[in-house]
Image (tube, rainbow, N blue to C red):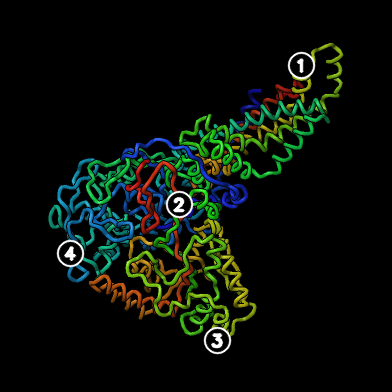
Amino acid sequence: MRYSHASKAVVLSAALALTLSACGGGSTETAGGEGDGSYVVTANTTEPQNGLLPANTNEVGGGRVMDLIFTGLVSYDAKGAPVNELAESIETEDSQNYTIKLKAGQTFSDGSPVTAASFVDAWNFGAAAKNAQLNSYFFESIKGFDEVNKEGSKKDEMEGLKVVDDTTFTVELSQPESDFPLRLGYTAFMPLPEAAFEDPKAFGEKPVGNGPYKLTEWNHDVNLKLEVNESYEGPREAQNGGIDFKVYQSTDSAYSDLLSNNLDVLDQIPPSSLASYETDLGDRSVNSPYAGNATITIPGYLDHFKQGEEGNLRRAAISRAIDRQLIIDKVYQGGKVKADDFTAPVLEGYSADIPGSEVLDFDAAEAKKLWEQADEISKWDSGDEFSIGYNVDGAGNKEYVEAVVNQLKSNLGINAVAQPFSSFKELREKVTSYKMTGAFRTGWQADYPSLYNFLGPLFGTGAGSNDGKYSSKEFDDKLAEGLSATDPAEGAKIFNEAQEILFKDLPAIPLWYQAVQGGWSENVDNVEFGWNGVPLYQQITGK
Amino acid sequence: MLSFTLKRISQLFPVFIGATLLVYFLVFATPGDPIAALSGGKPMSDATKAALTAQYNLDKPFWVQYGLYLKNLVTLDLGTSFSGQEVKEMLARAFPVTARLAILALVIEAVFGIILGVIAGMRKGKLFDSTVLVASLLVIAVPTFVLGFLLQYVVGVKLEWAKPTVSGAATWGELILPALVLGLVSLAYVLRLTRTSVIENKTADYVRTATAKGLSRNRVVTVHILRNSLIPVVTYLGADLGALMGGAIVTEGIFNVPGVGHLLYQAIQKGETPTVVAVVGVLVIVFVLANLIVDMLYALLDPRIRYA
């Protein structure tokens, strides 16, 4: 899941600072709702960027709806722990071969049964190259993925998936991966009814799912209406009468609606109101960390920063020259949490004191010393420039990148510059074709609650999001070892050992963990935000 | 008059082709790979990337892409967005909303701008005139977004006279506040144009003649002064309709109006060529037609102007 970068009307954020900085409390009017479960909650969203198909939904706007109208084998509770939904059991002896049994008698909201084939067919559909689904890489661990996800391949059945009977299927992975069961709550792994494959595009407009809600109306760029799905039985039963997702072009206008009780739940306070939202909303606001982080990636192909002694010294110097807390306080009004590792604190197995993590602590003198040591190996010419690239179409990027750059300038005495890119697409094209001439901003938002999700896809040799072309055999071996561990706690311990290697090499420099700043109206109660920063919509009740 | 109108309408085609070609090229030339952005920094397999690139013709050279676009255009197929929606449908949803907003803004600026302008012009140098002049200067000086947020906060959040944002239906009533914000700056210009024009015409010979003939003051002002003062104002209003429709993006953002501004902004960010070209194409048509209407109004306002 990623940020919907397109949703932020950047033009507006600066404006609000001028006008709303002086705003006081909200209003006191209340409306609707009997304190029972019939209240229809209004919530903000962005327009889903694709049709609502599990394997094609990779951003928050579509993701939050998908997670409510579909239910997979497991779902995650508020803390990110997996809870069985459709799965009766998920068994494995070697972390490579899984036998999955479904609860009997489950149906989609149109009455058609949820069977083992509903999963196998949906996953095969998602993986096949010919269907061009954005989440296809999620199935890459399944044996036979390479065959179906090959350019021009007509095949669409992975050999690792086998239906045993109506309620049982088996999964064979190409290597042991202990956190595979953890992934199964992610949107990409949802089942699909047979009807979906006849015309996937039409289905994406009017999806039929099996979650606690069903989608009854989708007015593009305006709203998505969800009604309670009576046939759903599971841990996420709806406590309200439905959810009306209103599409907002900017969080600023959503915030105005929240202040006047025209919107019930807002999951992102606009940057311009970060200083005032707690006074505006009082106990109707929240500020809590979720499974995401912000980093700066210094690609390994840059001169002076290649993997090795000089590169490592310079990376450490840069990391120690950044006063993260100061930026969090000044730029974000405390809305982030300083990073102490490469993952996120809400995850099971997280540790704040992995050996080597002190490299993330600010120490200007030490930074200068490390930089000078690197200079002894190969001189950093005073004319050399160290740039950090960012896309200007994401709110707040400019502010923090410039803050970091200024600290590097004054603490290391080097010529550091912020390098703007006109759009996310421009930055990503340069990054993914490995043509960057400097460092650049990166970040990761967890797809599923697991330490591995922050390590494997980002720093594994040749991994899909390894933007800095980092490669370390030692690290790869540790990851493989962690994945083959059968005990999750043991796995987490090994992943944290893998992080010790990252702290030495610093392929990316962690800055801070993301936190969600949200608020709710006077009309609703029981608003809680989950491990991924998304509100637990099904729990919300009217007053 | 008829041949003039036909001639002008036939000019629409080269203008339209030229504009779409230019816009298509501009979007084509903006740096960045839209498909790389679609994945949002998450991994994407080469096969998936290749399939998507081919699906949107992004692997073809510019002339082939544009040729395919024109070919589809003939059959009224405006292409699809990255989200798989028909651009035609997106336009059909967004344009009526923006059109309502722009027309409302135009009416507000024309009615209030002209009335206030005439009164100010007739009372040149008096208190009313100076007040209106200062107020209009203020409106011109303050950026639209500041006005927008201020009005939204005061009217929507504090006084609760209206909802701070517009609903999906975007009815005429809901659009009054956004239209006021959108039209306010133009209103100030219309007012000043009218005022200057009225002051100029007030001392003209034919006005003196009309007054000497014993015509009522009302008739002198509305028929003799106003009618002759409207030519520059109408020119401005005609050009402004297009500007209002294309320039509503800030206002639409503040009041969450689901119109073309939002559509265009998102499409530019994503590098979604068919959507950008279609929106701009329709805006071009609106501009040309509005200017045609202005030219025809000239003849009505001033009989000396005739089109062969």
Q: Nearer the viewer, residue A211 or A377?
A: A211
Relative placement, left or right, of A244 versus A229 is right
Q: Are marks 4 and 2 on the same chain?
A: yes
Distance, label 4 to label 3, CA atoms, is: 52 Å
Which residue lies most toward the top here?
Answer: B214
Q: Which residue is mark 3?
A: A373
The answer to whether dots 2 and 1 both sit on one chain is: no
Query: Which structural element holds mark 3?
Result: helix
Horizontal side of A28 relative to A213 (left or right) equals: right
Disc on res. A229: none
Q: CA distance from mark 1 to mark 4?
A: 92 Å
Discs 1 and 3 carry the same chain letter: no
Q: Chain of mark 4?
A: A
The structure residue drawn at horizontal position 62% and vertical position 81%, both measured from the top left corner, is: A381
Mark 3 or 2, nearer chain start: 2
Label 1: which residue? B218
- Where is mark 2, residue-wise? A285
Question: Could you confirm whether marks 4 and 3 are on the same chain?
Answer: yes
Q: Amino acid at mark 2?
A: Ser
Q: Position of residue B87 (x, y in %)?
A: 45, 42
Residue neighbourhood size for the residue with mark 3, other residues' Cα within 10 Å, grouped as few (<14), some (14–19), many (≥20): some
* Residue with the mark numbered 4: A91
Q: CB of mark 4 within 8 Å of CB of mark 2?
A: no
Host chain of mark 2: A
Residue B59 seen in render: no
In percent of the image, x 40 and y 46: which residue is there? Answer: B84
For marks 4 and 3 on the same chain, the one whose residue lies earlier in the sequence: 4
